Structures are given as structure tokens and as C-alpha cells.
Amino acid sequence: MLKKLVLFVVLLFCLKSFANDGYKLWLQYDYIKNENLRSEYQAATSNLMSFGTSETIKIALKELELGLNGMLGSDYKSASKNSVLIFGNKTNLSNDILQKLGNSFTEINEEGYIIKSLFLKEKNHIVISGKTDLGVLYGVFNFLKHIQTQKSIKTLNIKDSPKIDIRVLNHWDNLDRTVERGYSGFSIWDWHRLPDYLDPRYTDYARANASIGINGTVLNNVNANALILTPQYLDKVEALANVFRPYGIKVYLTARFSAPIEIGGLETADPYNNDVIQWWAEKTKEIYERIPDFGGYLVKANSEGQPGPQNYDRNHVDGANMLATALEPFNGVVMWRAFVYSEHDVTDRAKQAYSEFVPYDGQFKDNVLVQVKNGPIDFQPHEPFHPMFGAMPKTPLMMEFQITQEYLGQSTHSIYLPKQYEEVLNSDTYRKGKGSTVAKVIDGSLHDKKLTGIAGVSNIGNDVNWTGNPMLQANWYGYGRLAWNPYLSAEDIAEDWLRSTFSNDKRFIEPVKQMMMTTTEAVVNYMTPFGLHHIMATGHHYGPGPWVSNLSRPEWNPVYYHKADSLGVGFDRTPTGSHATEQYAPEVAKKFNDLKRISDEDLLWFHHVAWDYKMKNGKTLWNNMALKYQEGVDQVKQMMETWENMKPFVDEQRYNNIKMLLEIQYKEAKWWRDACLLYFQEYSNMPLPESVDKPTQTLDYFQSLSFPFAPGN
């Protein structure tokens, strides 16, 4: 009986050792089995020396030891007596090392780092340094990534700095721990037990963000609750800030514009009212007395029912500058969102943000950034870049990407969003001639901006694997990497993530990387091909709903966007329609206006096109649309087949998790195809091409579906 019990315990241990719940994200630090590589790494890192005593340096040392022990084994320190791994900031390094580094420090900024191989005093050295301890920590993570991704470290000469100053996650988390547009559990902020109970997950969150260069977090929803600014909650915010500080992460808060009324006892929130101005000044001072490195406020004002300066016949400049004045003595910033559209404005919704903000260019205070979504509508599977980028040369504009998948199948569907981010960042605004890319607007180089920023709406929840779907960890990772350097390749980022998260085996990397690079195209194909947009179901945005037409505001209805009728489909935004194209530079507008020059993917965004219109491939719009929906379904099927072949390279737990989610995605891709084609066929009155699978349900069936408890709503 004892032998059977021992055998059972051994088997249980073996099974558990091969399980992986995804909690470690891309910081797996798996043991390197390649003996040659392991020997190289062991020889180069055997003697570890740190300089500095700050908490950040202690964290860097702990991370190095954790990573090297995991990847090289606990005996790596005895591999060689002739190598030294040194890290510390510039002020702590010896003169002989500084001389060897030469003018390297002039080539990095305050958050930058240097990783360099040196030969000094008969020994090989690898030096990781920066102007600050935070730069050193970033360098340590990059050095460990080199080993994780099995790159050579024999001759290193790396100098790198972030190209964007403020690199934040926006958490749309509520104080009751629900998450608006959250699909991976509840909020990780346990407000009820804070400040006294500090979940270890907070430290792991900070560590993961630091590893990819994210340096800020907005803790609460843009649809804000003023209670976050009360002393009871500021105690909790302060506790989080103390955890995050050694990792270089500043805390920001979404400020509800009506807070002076709701928690301040005032009768108004008018930004010209002296009592209101004084209230914000005192509240801001109170926050900085608790949190000296507080980053500032994010504000959603006069949008979707949120209060703002327009309630008092003031404008966005009045509201933003009032808060900026309160933050100015403490070097804090205001991130003022440009996501505005009004039920009282009958013009094309895609035009409203530009019309409302561009006339104010140059009027905002120096510590105000206007936060602009990547496209002019709302985080769709595909949008053209927002016309505001490049159109406000006197105002810092920060990008807002959505990492959480509000309109993209939520956490069920695997989609690699850095491919979408890359396409937006590479888009040419032509505002200062050819090459005036969105990336150059964001990093400040196009208009010589000193203050720069980028935001990503978080996909993080308290699910054990953080993002609800292990594949979607790549979107958090990829956002961080592009926030650091918006010129990186999405494909290179995908490879780094795969190597760090799963395996360095090329038989795994190449097929899965190619799969990831096609996922954005697949989702667009089976949801919104050729520039269709915002045809998701009501409220929760889960599944198709192109037929929805009964909502109280026109621009909340999908029919507003696709405008399908017997003549054709699509939103005419050319000079014959809403003339939204005029908001772009002339070179861009000409392309969008011209049916012969516009890309297929933007066609129905800017044109109302006849069903029998012959596209570039000689086929009608209707046939092409049907074929695209089918292609999207087929692409998901191919994703399933690719993943099926990856079983030898992935632990059973994550393999099965992703396998099941891909099966759901395939099922729902067919749902999208069938529901949309049946609906649009009522207007086209054309048969489906032979190669398109015929729907197995009726349009009435799809219209009858209801999801009252869909998550994130």
C-alpha cells in the first residue's frame, strides 16, 4: 500500500511539473537544454556584481538571479572565474569601466540603458548600466530576454532608450471590481482589502510591466466614480503606488469632472468658478502629499453622458487647463480624451472629434496631452488612422490603443493586435510631406514635441493567466514593446514573445508566428470586410448585429454605419457624402476619395458602393464580400490545424486552453459569416458564390439570439 501511495505522489508531482497555468506570462525563464548555448551563458555570467542599494537595484539583482538560476541551473556561478556581470547606474561604476564605456551615456535618456561587453583586468565583463536605477532595471530585463530568446551574448553593444515618455495602461476598472469591457475576470485591484492587504499579484503586475517598459497605470475607469478621490480610496491608491514605485511605474487616476459637486460639497463644477479651481488645487496637493510621484489625471469629459466643461458653456481647453494648473507645481500631466460625439451633432460621427478639438490647437497648457483613439470611430477590427494625428502641430497628441477586445470577439478570439498597432503607427499622415507617419506624431519627432505619451486599454483581470486567453498575453506584451519603440516590427515582437513564453524550437516558432500574423486579417474578414464597421450587437458588442436600428441615438445603431440598401452598401464620406475625407491631408484625401486608388480594406468606410460594382479582381462587391467572410472562417480553421500540430511543443494545460478557445472562435466566425451574409443578402438580392458555405440557420434565428449576461458590459 505504501509503494502505491509513493508511486501516486511521484506521478502527481510529475504531472504538476508539466502543468503551466500561464501566470508567469513571458517571464517563464525555462531551463535551456542546448548545452552549447547554456555553457556560453554560464561562462559569461558566473561572477555577478551589483552596485547600488536602492529598492530598484535590489529588484534588478533578484530578477537576474531568478532568471539565470531558472535558465542556466543553480550551478551557473561556478562555470567560469574569468567573467564578471556588472550592473548599476553611472554614478556607482568605477572610473575604469566608465572610461571603457566612453560617451555611451550621451546616447541614452534618463530611462535608457547600456549593455556592453568589455575586457578589463584580464577578465571579460558584461556591464548593464544607465543614468538611473530604472534604466538599469530595464537593461536587466533586456539582457535576460537575450538569453530567453537564445541570442548570443559574446559581443554585446546595446544602447536603447524609450522613444515615448508616458507609456501607460488604462484600466477600465470600477470600484466594485467589475471591469468595463473586461473579459478576464474581475479587477485585480481588491479595493475592499486595500490598503492593508497587498496581494502579491500587485508586485507581479509591476514586474511584468517593467519588463516591457510600461511606466504608468491609470487605476480606474474613464467612466469614473468620484469616490476614488476621497481619503478612504486615496489610502488604497497610495498603497499601490508604494508597491509600483521601485519598478518605475507611476500611478494616474481618472478624474470625474463633477467631483467638486459629488464629493466636495460645491454647487458647481464650472472650471471658471474660483471655489472649483481652489478645490482641485487642494485635492491635487493632497494627492501629492501622499504620492510624490503621482502622474496626473486622465479625463473623459462631455462624452457618452460623462460630465465636463460643456455643461457650463465652457470648452475642452477650459476644463483641461484648469486641471493642468492644479498639477503644474508638481510636474503632473492631464491626459484629456478626444473621444467625443454628441447626439445633438447630426454630422458624421467620424468627423466630430476632429471638428471639436483641432480648432483649439495651441491653446492647451504645456502639461496637457490630448489622447486620441487610433481610428475615428471606436476600436474597430479595422479603421483608417484618426485624422487628428498630424493635424494639431502645436498640441501633444497621445495614442490610445485598445488591448482588451471589446469589438474583436473579446477574450475568446485569438487576435494578435500589435499587427494592427503597427499598421496604424506606419500610416502616413502627409502633414509635413511624405513620411509624416503617425509614429512620428506620437514620439514627438514630427512637430518637435517635448511631452509624448501612449495609452493602451488593459486586457488584464484576475484570471490566473491574467488575460483570459494565453494567446492574448501577446497583446499586452506587444503594446509595451511598441510603446517603448513604435518603429519595431510586429513580427519580431511576436517571435520574442513566443520564445519567451512557449518554446525556442523553430518547428514551433515559425508556424505559430505566421498564424499570429494572419489573425488580424482573419478577424476583419469574418466580421467587417472591406471597411464595414460597428456592426456588432447592442451594448455588449458580442457577436453580429448589422440589423440593429432601434436604439435611441442614430450613431449607436449599426445601420447608421453600413447604410445597406437595394443600391449598395457603405458610408459615403467623400465630397458627395459627409466629406469626412477633407479632414485628412490632401494627398490622403485624394486616395480615399478615388474608387480606383483606395485600398479594398477602406472601401466601404469611405464609399457607398453598388452590389454589382466590379472590384479590382474583376468580381462584384457582393461576391467579394461573401468570399471574404468565407476566407475569414477558413483562416480560423487553418489556425486550429496549425495549433493541433503544436502539441509536442506546449505544456498540456495551455495547449488545451488555447485549443478549446480556437474551437469557439471557429464556431463564432461561422456565426458572423452566416448572420451577416443573410442580412446583407436581403438588400443585394444576389446568390452566394458556390464556394461559400450555405447558412444552416435562418436570419430570424440569428436575430432572436440574446446574451443578457455577456461579460464586460
Image (cartoon, rainbow, N blue to C red):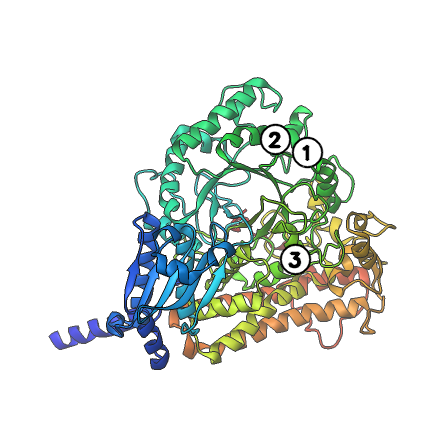
Say whether marks 1 and 3 touch (CB < 8 Å). no
Judged left or right of residue 197, residue 259 is right
Judged left or right of residue 468, residue 46 is left
Residue 607 in view in this figure: no
**Which of these two is toward me, 75 or 337?**
75
Task: Please name the residue that numbered disc 3 is placed on.
Answer: 424
Residue 131 in view in this figure: yes
Mark positioned earlier in the residue sequence (1 or 3): 1
Residue 83: x and y in percent read 31, 70
Q: Which mark is residue 500?
A: none
**Which of these two is toward me, 110 or 297?**
110
Q: CA distance from mark 1 to mark 3?
A: 27 Å
Q: CA distance from mark 2 to mark 3?
A: 29 Å
Mark positioned earlier in the residue sequence (2 or 3): 2
Residue at the farthest left position: 2
Task: Please name the residue that numbered disc 2 is placed on.
Answer: 321
Q: Amino acid at mark 3?
A: Val
Mark positioned earlier in the residue sequence (1 or 2): 2
Q: Amino acid at mark 2?
A: Asn
Q: CA distance from mark 1 to mark 2?
A: 9 Å
Label 2 SS = helix
Q: Nearer the viewer, mark 2 or mark 3?
A: 2
For label 1, count other residues whose C-alpha is less than 10 Å away and answer few (under 14), some (14-19) or many (20+): some
**Considering the image in quadrants, where does the N terminus appear?**
bottom left
Task: Please name the residue that numbered disc 1 is placed on.
Answer: 363
Residue 600: x and y in percent read 76, 65
Say whether marks 1 and 2 touch (CB < 8 Å). yes
Q: Amino acid at mark 1?
A: Gln
Residue 200: x and y in percent read 32, 50
For label 2, count other residues whose C-alpha is less than 10 Å away and answer few (under 14), some (14-19) or many (20+): many
Residue 584: x and y in percent read 77, 50
